Image: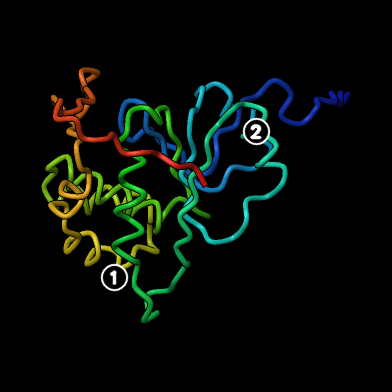
Amino acid sequence: MCMVKVDVEENDGVLVPPANFSLVEDGIFRSGFPEPSNFGFLETLNLRSIIYLCPEAYPQENMDFVDAHNVKLFQFGIEGKTESSSTSIPSYTVTEALKVLIDVRNHPVLIHCKRGKHRTGCLVGCFRKLQTWCLSSVFEEYQRFAGVKWRATDLRFIETFEVMCLRQCLYSIIYHYQGYGSNKRRLLYREEGIQKPKIKSI
């Protein structure tokens, strides 16, 4: 029997998404930390923004990618933790990240942390509460991405996160969602002479 060996360049022409990649909502994506092998795939998303939820500095090769594609990087340094950790996720930081997330001027946007499980899962879970999802559906989605490493502390954080506080912090911005998957989402400003909030990239 004759064996024929064919040399194929690794990942030649193949678009590889980051680990735990998924669509959250029209114009919103989530994933684990993008590697250089994922850059070709990210190009297809035509991203305007990335929400990065880790405190560590963004790697230079990732910075080169966002600079080359004119992507705004918003970094919210949430420390990683374990189930037994006494450090809780800061609600204020999640609120600030949500302000960036729901601003359609930043879409398409990618949310990621290290593995796309806990910090990303908490932010998406709070976003779902803002969309008025029932808690059982929010928890099911979180656990689906976290797998066997889901954390009860994260679920408690999502459950107790106060979305009314976020609505009050949005000043003059009102976002209307007509159905969970609708493309009819609109960004409105009240015509009251109130200065529009400035979005600052980090």
Q: Circle 2 sits in a helix, a strand or a loop, which is it?
A: helix
Q: Going 62% across and 26% down the picture, which residue do you hit?
A: 69
Report which residue position mark 2 lands on: 67
Circle 2 packing at 10 Å, graded few (<14), some (14-19), many (20+), is: few
- In the rendered structure, which amino acid carries the disc numbered 2? Asp
Of the pair 53 and 11, the residue shown nearer to us:
53
Whether residue 29 is situated above or below residue 79 in the rendered picture: above
Q: Going 18% across and 44% down the picture, which residue do you hit?
A: 130
Circle 1 packing at 10 Å, graded few (<14), some (14-19), many (20+), is: some
Report which residue position mark 1 lands on: 153
Residue 180 position in % (x across, y down): 19, 30
Lower position in the chain sequence, tag 2 or tag 1: 2
Outermost residue on the front side: it is 193
**Picture quadrant where residue 92 is located:** bottom left
**Picture quadrant where residue 195 is located:** top left
Report whether 123 appears left or right of 20. left
Of the pair 5 and 195, the residue shown nearer to us:
195
Residue 59 position in % (x across, y down): 68, 50
- CA distance separating discs 2 and 1: 36 Å
- In the rendered structure, which amino acid carries the disc numbered 1? Thr
Whether residue 199 is situated above or below residue 122 in the rendered picture: above
